[in-house]
């Protein structure tokens, strides 16, 4: 068990450092909040609490964008370098290698959140007024961890496919829509609203919004992030076992 925790900690630290120095990954987490916060500025007339919430939403969108684009790309890079088969065959379980990658990719999304808040403060003069700072500070890592766990669940399926980078991009915009990051969940069709509750970004954004505006139940939303993260990890580990068996049977771990 201590060795397993060392592997998880080392993998998280190494991948976070690598991603923080990657021009492409930094571009994803920097460009998303700038673009969407600018759009929100014109939509909401230039200020107010809703503009602050929109900036936070743009940061969460950056976290999810990083998870889908960079997560799929990380698996594809391992295939291209020829190390994916070696990692799968290593003595440590493959989930302990894949999970730190997913969490690290989500963790660099914290840059999106910080840049979004700084951007609206400096360029649009929106004051950073958080009603419940303890809940807000707790909601940020809870949201990142839950989204990272969801990325781990998706990544377990991407191990099976050689076109992992293309498959990962499919989930970016639909999750933005379903989770209420672009539009409120309340305006979605009635049959789709229960589906949004299955995705961690919905609860993470709800916690951040509630902590910012002093509304809702942010601590309960943080708890739901933790519950969903645990569910994603269990489901991801089970799916990973199935897809690894399928990848071995069909020889799809390598590019050739």
Image: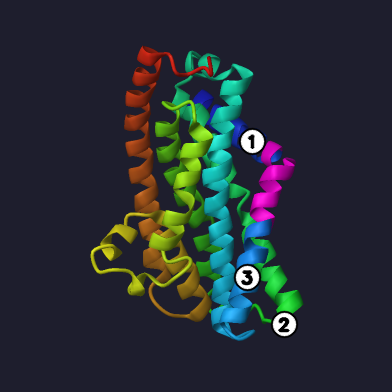
Instruction: Bin the neighbour count of mark 1 within 10 Å (Cα to Cα): few under 14, some 14-19, many 20 and up.
Output: some
Q: Is residue 226 above or below residue 132?
A: above
Residue drawn at the location 69% of the way across and 44% of the way down: 24
Precedes in sequence: disc 3 or disc 2: 3
**For discs 2 and 1, the disc positioned in front in the rendered view:** 2
Residue 232 image position (x, y, % from top left): 36, 43
Residue drawn at the location 39% of the way across and 64% of the way down: 221
Residue 28 is inside the magenta segment: yes
Residue 15 image position (x, y, % from top left): 64, 35
Residue drawn at the location 38% of the way across and 28% of the way down: 240
Which secondary structure lies at badge 1?
A: helix
- The numbered dot on residue 37 is 3
Q: Is residue 100 above or below residue 179?
A: above
Pointer 3 with pointer 1, Cβ within 8 A: no
Q: Nearer the viewer, residue 234 or 168?
A: 168
Precedes in sequence: disc 3 or disc 1: 1
Question: How far apart, in angstroms, are the residues tagged by discs 3 and 1?
Answer: 28 Å
Question: How far apart, in angstroms, are the residues tagged by discs 3 and 2?
Answer: 13 Å
In the picture as drawn, the residue positioned furthest to the left comes out as: 191
Q: Is residue 202 above or below residue 215?
A: above
Residue 189 image position (x, y, % from top left): 28, 68
Residue 107 image position (x, y, % from top left): 59, 48
Q: Is residue 112 left or right of residue 8?
A: right
Q: Is residue 191 left or right of residue 196?
A: left
Query: Where does label 1 land, which residue?
Result: 15
Residue drawn at the location 58% of the way across and 18% of the way down: 83
Residue range of the region highlighted in magenta in the rendering? 18-30
Query: Where does label 2 land, which residue?
Result: 125
């Amino acid at each position: 068990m201590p060795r397993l925790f060392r592997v998880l900690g080392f993998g998280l630290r190494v991948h976070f450092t690598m991603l923080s120095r990657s021009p492409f990954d930094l571009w994803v987490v920097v460009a998303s909040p700038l673009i969407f916060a600018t759009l929100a500025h014109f939509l909401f007339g230039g200020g107010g609490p809703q503009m602050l919430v929109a900036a936070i939403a743009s940061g969460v969108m950056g976290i999810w964008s990083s998870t889908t684009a960079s997560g799929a790309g990380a698996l594809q890079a391992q295939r291209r370098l020829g190390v994916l088969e070696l990692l799968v065959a290593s003595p440590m379980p493959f989930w302990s290698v894949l999970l730190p990658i997913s969490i690290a990719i989500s963790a660099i999304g914290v840059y999106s959140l910080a840049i979004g808040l700084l951007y609206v403060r400096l360029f649009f003069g929106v004051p950073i007024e958080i009603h419940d700072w303890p809940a807000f500070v707790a909601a940020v890592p809870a949201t990142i961890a839950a989204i990272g766990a969801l990325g781990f669940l998706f990544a377990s399926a991407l191990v099976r496919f050689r076109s992992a980078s293309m498959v990962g991009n499919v989930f970016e915009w639909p999750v933005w829509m379903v989770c209420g990051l672009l539009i409120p969940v309340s305006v979605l069709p009635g049959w789709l609203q229960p589906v949004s509750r299955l995705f961690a970004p919905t609860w993470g954004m709800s916690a951040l919004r509630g902590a910012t505006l002093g509304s809702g139940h942010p601590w309960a939303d943080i708890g739901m992030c933790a519950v969903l993260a645990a569910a994603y990890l269990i489901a991801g580990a089970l799916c990973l076992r199935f897809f690894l068996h399928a990848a071995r049977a069909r020889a799809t771990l390598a590019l050739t």
